[in-house]
Amino acid sequence: MSPRMFYIAFNTFREAVRDRVLYNLIAFAVLLSGAAIFVGQISIQIERLVVVNLGLTAVSLFGIVIAIFIGIGLVSKEIEKRTLYTMLSRPVRRWEFIVGKFLGLAGTLMVNTFFMAIGVFGALLYVAHKFTAPDALILVALYFIILEFLIICALALLFSSFSSPLLSAVFAFSLFVIGSFADDLRGFAALTHGLTRWLATGAAYLVPNFSALNVISAVAHAQPIGLQLILQNTLYALFYTAMTLSAAVLIFERRNLK
Amino acid sequence: MAAIEILGLEKTYMVGFWQKRPKRALQPLHLAVEEGEIFGFLGPNGAGKTTTLKLLMGLVFPTAGTARILGHEWTDPAIKAQIGFLPEQPYFYDYLTAHELLDYYGQLSGVPGKERKHKVEEVLQRVGLTDVKGVQLRKFSKGMLQRVGIAQAILHNPRVVFFDEPMSGLDPLGRREVRDLIEQLKHEGKTVFFSTHILPDAEALCDRVAIIHKGELRGVGAVADLTSTVQGKVEVIWHGTQIPASMKALGAECHVTGETVRAIVPEKQQDAAIDALRRERLRLIAITPLRTSLEAYFVEKLQHSQTTAGTRS
C-alpha cells in the first residue's frame, strides 16, 4: 500500500488541528457538563437516559457538521487555491490523493469522537456514580456513529470532487437528512404502485440508510443490540463508503484542473 | 536524448453554460528540449504557456497528442519523481511552516527520511530563506512564497525542472538570485524549461527559446542565433552631445543619451562615420555590429502572425 496516501492523510489531519477544528470539543464539553449538572439536580431517575441520549446525539451532530464542512472543501479548496498543482506534479496518483484525504478526515473525526466518548462516559459517571453492564452498549452506538461519519465523509468528498463547496454542502446535508429517514422512505415505497413505487424504492436504496445506524435511543433505554445488526451495518457502511469513494475517484481522475 | 518531447499536444476547452462551444487553448504543439538545456517558453499573457505546462504536469488532459519526458510517457507517475514544477503564482498550505511543507513534499516525492531534513535545510539556504523556522507560510510575502515554490521544485533533485513565470513577484535582487540559481541548475546538468513573458530574463538565461501566441507555436531557435543576426548595420557610440552634419548625410539614426551619442549607420558607411568623428575630434567609445534583440525577434513573430491573419481575413 502506498505510503503517500498516509502522508496526505496525516497532512489533512494536521490541517484540521491547525484550523482549530478540535475546538468543537470545548463546546461539546460545555454542553455535556451543563446537561449533566442540570440532570443531576432534577434527579427523577432518568439521568442515564437523558445523558446518553443527549451525549450520543451531540457526538453524532458535531461529527456530521465537521464531516460536511471539512469534507466539502477537501478537493474543491485544493483546486481553487491551486495547492493541488504542486501535489499532482509529484508521483502522487489522483486516487491516492482522494483516499488520503478521506483517511485524514475520517481520522480527524475518530480522534474527535474518542475525546467526546470520554466526555459522555464522564458525564454518565457524574450522574449515575457508577457504570453498569448496559453502558457497554454506548460503545456500539459510538461505533455506528463512526460508520455514519465514514459514509458522510465519502459523500462530502464525492460532491467536492465535482461541485462548489456551497452546492456540496447542500447535497451532503440533504442526503444526510433523507438518509436519516431511509426506513420511512422504504415504508412509503411499499405503499405506492407503478412507476412511483419503482422510483421511491430506487431512491430509498440509493440514499445512505442512516436510520439503521442510529441506535442511540435503543442504547439509552438499555435495549440489547444484536451481533447481526453490528455485522450488517459494518458491511453496509464499508460497502457504501467504498462505492462512494470509487465514484469520487472516477470523477476526479477525469477532471481538468483549469 | 531529448529531455522533453512534445508530440502534437493540443487542448480544446468547451466553454459556455447552456450552449457549449469549443475554445482552442493550444494548437497541436511539437517541440523537443535537449537534456541540459535552459529552454525559454515565451509568449504574451494568455498565449498558452501555462496550458502547455499543465498538460505536461498531467493537471489537464490533452484533446490530442502525447509527450515524453526523459524517454518515458509523460503520464507515467514514476517519471514525476524526476521532475520539479513551480506553478505560476504558487500557493501552499499556509498553516504549515516552510520546513514542514518541504518535508511533506519530500515524503511525497520519495526522498528518504534520513536525507530529508538535510535536504530541506540545504534547499532553503539555496533560495535564500534561512531564517524562517517556525514561521507559518500565511505570514510569508509574495516573494518569499515564490522562493518556497522554487525550493519545492528542486528539493528532490529532479533531472528536469519546469518553472512557470519563476521571476514573478520577485524584486530585482530576487530576480538576479533566481537567474543565478537557474544557471547553477544548468551547471548541475539539469534541464530547465521555463515560461516567461519577460524577454531580458530569457535572453540572459536561455540556450533556446520557443515563441507561442494564441495557442500556436510561432518560432523556435537558439538565442545565440536569433540575437546574432547582423542586419547590415553597425552601432557607433561616441562621447559628447554633438552630431556631425556629415553623419546625418550618411543616413545615420542618432540618439543623444546624457553625455553619449548612439548612431545606427549602414555597415558600408562605417569608415565614413569614423572619419566624420575624427574630423570633429569627437571621442569614439564603441563600434559594434547591430544585433537583433530577442525582443525584436519576439515582436516580429507576433506581428507576422497578425499580418498573416489580417491577410487571410
Image (cartoon, coloured by chain):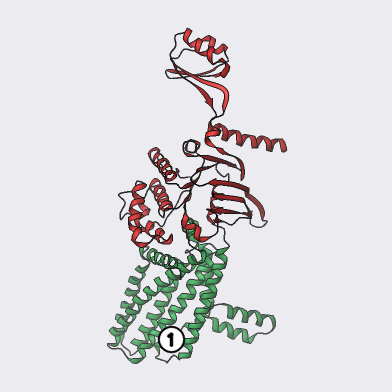
Q: Residue at x 56, y 77 (%)?
A: A207
Chain A appears what colour? green
Towards the viewer: B302 or A183: B302
Question: Horizontal placement of A30 versus B272: left or right?
Answer: left
Q: From the rendered image, report the letter of the chain displayed in red.
A: B
Q: Residues within 10 Å of mark 1 (few under 14, many from 20)?
A: some
Which image quadrant for residue A223?
bottom left
Question: Horizontal placement of B24 versus A9: left or right?
Answer: right
Q: Say which chain tag 1 marks.
A: A
Looking at the rendered image, the quarter that the C terminus of chain B falls into is top right
Q: Residue at x 36, y 47 (%)?
A: B126
Q: Is residue B95 visible?
A: no
Residue matched to label 1: A217
* In the depicted structure, whether residue A8 falls above or below residue B125: below
The x and y percentages for residue B71 are 55, 54
Q: Is residue A239 visible?
A: yes
* In the depicted structure, whether residue B231 falls above or below residue A109: above
Outermost residue on the front side: it is B1
Which image quadrant for residue B107?
bottom left
The x and y percentages for residue A199 are 65, 79
Count of residue discs: 1
